[in-house]
Image (cartoon, helix red, strand yellow):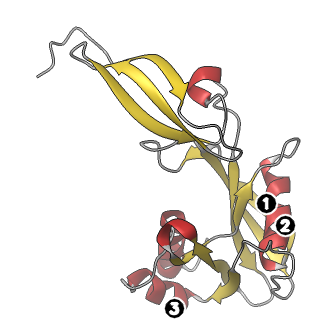
Amino acid sequence: MSTGNHKIKIKNSRALTDRKFVNLFEIIYSDKNGNERKWDFVSRQNPPKIGTKAFDVVDAVIIVPWHVSSSRLVVIKEFRMPLNDYQYGFPAGLVDPGEIPEQSAVRELYEETGLKATVIRRSSPPIYVSSGLTDESIVMVYLDCEGEPSNRNAGSAEDIETVFLSRQDAKEMCADPDLKVDVKTWLVMDCFSASGRI
């Protein structure tokens, strides 16, 4: 039971690993009762945003592509190491230094699917994907695209298949308990299956 006079206060954070793309950090904080506690989280930034206050730095983009000539939503089926399985999701990738999210989206879409962006429809503000685990922020970029799918530009560690979805396809995938689907992708597919729009 809270004493009512304290607020959660972060005292310090420290790196537990030193890797290139992601690191584990420990936060030391006091809880609402004034007790000292620890919280582990991962960050793509080193030092993490909690130390730099650079919450305006966007780590990655999620691309929501609409294939104009086929009138289909584009998703990818990609092998994901932590799942040891394939997951359905949207093309995505890290924002390179000097890029704005929309530039990253156009580049990543082509690299992962071979499709070419034609129109950027809209972009989200920076949003957080799993703030209990990470300070990673993403921007969702909705765009129109054209072309034929190809994985010739994907890296050797990327096992990706491009999938075009009709409204009915999206509805069936959302209801299939045997598929592994990224949460952001599931939400967009669910909306698409209900309304026919993205």
- Residue at the (41%, 42%) spot, across then down: 132
Dot 2: element? strand
Foreground pick, 134 / 148 = 134
Count the labels in the image.
3
Any mark on residue 168, and which? Answer: 3
Q: Give the image location of residue 1, x and y in percent.
A: 11, 22
Q: Identify residue type, mark 3.
A: Gln
Reply above or below: 5 against 188: above
Q: Is residue 135 visible?
A: no
- Residue at the (78%, 74%) spot, across then down: 156
Left/right placement of residue 103 relative to residue 159 reads: right
Q: Give the image location of residue 124, x and y in percent.
A: 65, 50
Any mark on residue 105, and which? Answer: 1
Q: Earlier in the sequence, mark 1 or mark 3?
A: 1
Reply above or below: 122 against 171: above
- CA gap between label 1 and label 3 equals 26 Å
Foreground pick, 192 / 81 = 81
Q: Is residue 60 visible?
A: yes
**Label 2 belongs to which residue?**
119
Image quadrant assignment for residue 111: bottom right
Q: Identify residue type, mark 2.
A: Val
Q: Identify residue type, mark 1.
A: Ala
Q: Earlier in the sequence, mark 2 or mark 1?
A: 1
Q: Give the image location of residue 21, x and y in percent.
A: 69, 47
Q: Earlier in the sequence, mark 2 or mark 3?
A: 2
Front of the two marks 2 and 1: 1
- Residue at the (58%, 45%) spot, across then down: 127
Dot 1: element? helix
Query: Could you classify mark 3 by the number of other residues whose Cα lies within 10 Å: few (under 14), some (14-19), or many (20 or more)?
Result: some
